[in-house]
Image (cartoon, grey):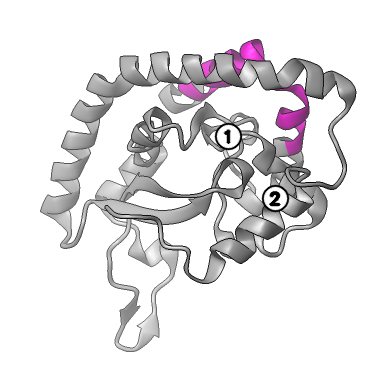
């Protein structure tokens, strides 16, 4: 796998995120938030590990079935890997099951995302199975089961200072905005929901989001 490449978005993005999100300065969180919520991050990490380890074996079985289906339908890797900023702007590799063909152009014409989605990929997306490999990100401590969804560095660079507060908590496999409409709006337009979560996150809110996520997937 190797080290995460810094590239165009490395140090500059990290510094920008940390400066504007209050990690290295800027507007501070209310006293109550500073007093009560940081300790929960430790509880949150224990909860993540317990649930991730519990889900690991069934997740691997589902991932293996998806891997086989993807390879049988289209050529190319079964996994899709991107670099995303996480807690405090630290860059990490996020893993997803590939749901599109690798080809981006046909006869010199760019293909839309809709044209690139495979039959298998369409089923995987409807069941939200493409996010399952991120269980490994959770085990490694790069993500949480619940939190703001990791965003593309190119979009993060366009964030207003208030939007960068989303990096004061671990990024999640699922989150508050996913259970309110299942992502009907583009991810970059749901920062308000992310800020709501950051201001109110707790053990019971995380449990509520996990149950709602499971219910939405099953439904």
Q: Nearer the viewer, residue 99 or 143?
A: 143
Residue 117 in the image: state x and y as whole percent: 34, 58
The residue drawn where x is 33% and y is 41% is 124
Q: Quadrant of residue 42?
A: top right
Please tell me how crowded label 1 is: few (under 14), some (14-19), or many (20+) other residues with Cα within 10 Å.
many
Residue 204 colored in magenta in the image: yes
CA gap, disc 2 to disc 1?
Answer: 14 Å
Residue to which mark 1 is pinned: 170
Mark carried by residue 18: 2
Label 2 Cα crowd, 10 Å radius (few <14 / some 14-19 / many 20+): many
Question: Closer to the camera, 27 or 63?
Answer: 27
In the rendered view, does 210 fall on the left or right side of 181?
left
Relative placement, left or right, of 185 versus 145 is right
Please tell me which residue is depicted at 28% across the width and 72% down the height of the picture: 103
Range shown magenta: 195-214
- Is any part of residue 155 visible from this angle? no
Q: Indicate yes or no whether the magenta region holds residue 186.
A: no
Disc nearer the start of the sequence (2/1): 2
Compared with residue 54, is residue 169 higher up or lower down, i.e. above or below?
below
The answer to whether residue 142 is visible is: yes
Q: Residue furthest top?
A: 204
Residue at the spot x=28%, y=22% of the render? Answer: 56
């Amino acid at each position: 796998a190797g080290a995460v490449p810094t590239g165009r978005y490395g140090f500059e993005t990290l510094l920008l995120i940390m400066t504007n999100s209050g990690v290295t300065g800027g507007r501070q969180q209310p006293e109550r938030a500073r007093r009560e919520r940081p300790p929960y991050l430790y509880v949150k990490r224990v909860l993540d590990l317990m649930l991730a380890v519990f889900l690991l074996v069934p997740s691997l079985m589902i991932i293996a079935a998806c891997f086989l289906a993807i390879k049988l339908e289209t050529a190319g890797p079964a996994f899709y890997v991107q670099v995303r900023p996480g807690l405090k702007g630290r860059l990490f590799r996020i893993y997803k099951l590939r749901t599109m063909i690798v080809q981006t152009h046909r006869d010199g014409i760019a293909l839309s995302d809709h044209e690139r989605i495979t039959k298998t990929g369409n089923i995987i997306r409807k069941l939200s199975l493409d996010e399952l490999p991120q269980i490994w990100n959770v085990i490694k401590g790069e993500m949480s089961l619940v939190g703001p969804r990791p965003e593309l560095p190119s979009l993060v660079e366009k964030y207003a200072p208030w939007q960068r507060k989303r990096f004061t908590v671990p990024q999640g496999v699922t989150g508050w905005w996913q259970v309110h409409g299942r992502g009907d709006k583009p991810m970059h337009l749901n920062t308000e929901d992310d800020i709501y979560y950051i201001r109110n996150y707790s053990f019971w809110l995380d449990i509520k989001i996990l149950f709602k996520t499971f219910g939405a997937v099953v439904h």
